Structure formats: C-alpha cells, structure tokens
Amino acid sequence: GFIFMILLSSTAYSQPLRVVTEIKPPLQMVTNDNVVTGAMVEVVEAMLKHANIDTSIEVYPWARSYQMALTHSNTLIFSMFRNKSRENNFQWIGKLLTINSYLVSLKSTKNMSITSLDDAKKYSVGTIRDDLSQHYLCENGFVQDKNLYLNSDHKVLWHMLSSGRTDLVFANDLLWQHEMKYAGLDPSTVQFVYQLPNFATDLYVAASLDVEQSVITQLKNALNAMKASGEYHKILSKWQLNLKHNSQEFKQ
C-alpha cells in the first residue's frame, strides 16, 4: 500500500485544496469554541460551496499562512493586499473588499475645514507606529511630535482623539467602528472629515501558483456569480460592512 500511496499523492486530484487565513476582526475571527467566522470567511465559504469544493478554512498567524500559499501547496489565502511585490507569486481569484482611508475628528470639533492634506497639517493627527499610514504621512510632510503622533495600538489612538489630545485620527472605513468599540468608545461621536487620496487598498482572495487552472476558473466564476446575485452584498450587510459613513460627502 505504501508505494500506491506515493503514486496517489503525486496526482493533483488527491491533494485537497487548503484554505488559510489570519485573525482580523471582523473579516476573519475564531469564536471561543473554535469556530472560524467573520465577513470574509462567509464570502469565501460561499464561494467554495458554489464551486463545489469541500474543504475547511485554517487560521494561522499571517506569516505562516502567507508562507504556505507562497510555497505552492495547493493553497488559497485571504484576505490579502495585492501589490507589485506579490503580483507574480500568486494567482489572483478576485477582489473581496476595497478599503478607503480617512481623517476622522470628533463631531464636537467645530469649524474644521480640510480640503487637502496640507490643510490637515495645522492639526495633530494620530496614527499607529510603523503602519503604512505613518510612512504615507511622513512622505507627505508631517512631522513626528509636531503634527503627527504615533500610538502603539488602536485603543490608545482612539482615546487620544476622544480626550482631545489629538485633533484627528488616520482611520480606514472598514475597521474604525470595531476599533472604537474595542476601546470602549462610541462610534457615533466621530465624523469623517477628509478622504486620503491614493490610499485605497484592495483585499483579495488568491491561490498558490500550483492550483490548477480549472479550479481557479471555477472559483472566479463562483465569486462573480455571488456578486451578481446580491449574495456577496448580503453578507457584507449582515456584518455591517456596507462602508457607508455618517458623513454625507463620502457616499461610496
């Protein structure tokens, strides 16, 4: 039986598709009783079901999931930013979500008018240390401890805004409510005042290079069908990811 096993495992069909992700609420989470859930988990599970692929989603630290998908082990990975350095290392199945970034202030802050990034330099902006947002602001002329304040985590970041120690927070439209609630703050106390230009990022579901072309096509068709039928949109609504804001200017 041993030799037979080796022969069998060298055929593509016997190797089940692995699906890996990381914990990133509300997109991907693990409940206390070890159930994998979240908005993008539901989207990917529905896509697999439509494509008649029976497999389960495994959750690891990002570096490990990424390595697995990179080393061609018949693996799907989500939710992953698509950029130049990754472009040729994966097969890109489809976009799951576009994240836009904004400067956010307290609603109680009156007469704040920001129509350009330069306008924002008159105010203090909080962001997360070593985040892409820090590099973006520094490249655009913000100066640390003058008008840019770096925080170790999102809890501190939002409390700085809430207590008036910073005027603005650099936030994205996907996670801001989640972050504020986690910090014990009320999301209805803030407003989006300025959308940051050239800072939208797309999250994708992708596959390792060794996943067969027929499987890729099946998955692409499944995701497109879900978007066309409204099923995808329904999942986003259920998880409150319609990405609509309390600020009229930013109707998506």
Image: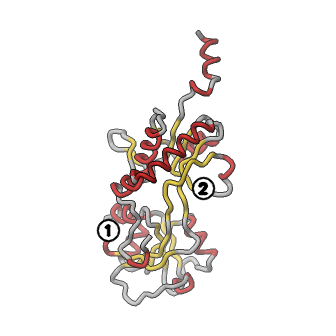
Most foreground residue, 96 or 186: 96
**SS at mark 1 in the image:** loop
Instruction: Decide: is 2 above or below 217.
Output: above
Residue 116 image label: none
Estimate the x, y position of residue 246 in percent, counting from the top left: 35, 74
Estimate the x, y position of residue 159 in percent, counting from the top left: 38, 71
Most foreground residue, 186 or 42: 42
What is the quadrant of residue 83 in the picture? bottom right
Estimate the x, y position of residue 25 in percent, counting from the top left: 41, 53
Q: What amino acid is found at the position of numbered circle 2 in the picture?
A: Arg
For label 1, the crowd category at 10 Å Cα-Cα, with few meaning under 14, some 14 to 19 and many 20 or more, is some
Q: Residue at x 62, y 46 (%)?
A: 91
What residue is shown with label 1? Answer: 185
Measure the alpha-carbon separation of dots 1 and 2.
32 Å
**Tag 2 or tag 1, which sits nearer the N-term?**
2
What is the quadrant of residue 199 in the picture? bottom right
**SS at mark 2 in the image:** loop
What residue is shown with label 2? Answer: 82
Instruction: Decide: is 210 above or below 249.
Output: above
